[in-house]
Image (cartoon, rainbow, N blue to C red):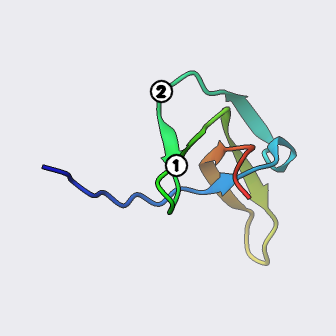
Amino acid sequence: MACDSVDFQNITSDLANLSVHSEYDGIDEVVIRDGSSLQVTHVGSTTFPSFLKPFKLTNILCVPNIH
């Protein structure tokens, strides 16, 4: 039996978009619509300025081959 799961993550292809990052040594991959898998190389976070207070995103995946 196959089980479909949908999980939403913030993803970037450019490591420079992450203000803090570390190498990802897990086995998880990102599966895209055509069914192929792409390797996660780093995980990190970034902060965006906003009117009231900075907006922080954490656990952003860096997947260089996603376009």
Identity of the residue drawn at 69% across and 52% down = 66
In the picture, measured across the screen, residue 24 lies left or right of residue 34, that is right
Q: Quadrant of residue 48?
A: bottom right
Towards the viewer: 16 or 50: 16
Q: Which corner quadrant holds the C terminus?
A: bottom right
* Amino acid type assigned to the residue bearing label 1 in the image: Ser
- Looking at the picture, how far across and down is residue 58, in whole percent? 61, 48
Q: Amino acid at mark 2?
A: Ile
The x and y percentages for residue 54 are: 74, 63
Q: Which badge, 2 or 1, comes first in the chain's sequence?
A: 2
Q: Residue at x 36, y 61 (%)?
A: 6
* Residue 64 vs residue 58, the one in the foreground: 64
Residue at left offset 64%, top offset 54%: 11
Task: Sort mark 1 into few (<14), some (14-19) or many (20+) by Cα contacts within 10 Å.
Answer: few
Per the model, the C-alpha gap separating discs 2 and 1 is: 15 Å
Q: Quickly name the residue at label 2.
A: 27
Check disc 1 and report the residue beneath it. 36
Q: Secondary structure at mark 1?
A: loop
Helix, strand or loop at label 2? It is loop
Please give left or right for residue 10 compared with residue 45 in the image. left
Q: Residue furthest right?
A: 16
Q: Quadrant of residue 57?
A: bottom right
**Left or right for 3, reference 35:** left
Q: Is residue 22 above or below residue 18?
A: above
What is the crowding at mark 2: few (fewer than 14 residues within 10 Å), some, or many (at least 20)?
A: few
2 and 1 marks in contact (CB < 8 Å): no
What's the residue at 40%, 57% (across, down)?
7
Against 21, is 36 above or below? below
Expressed as whole percent of the image width and height from the top left, the position of residue 25 reads: 57, 21
Closer to viewer: mark 2 or mark 1: 1
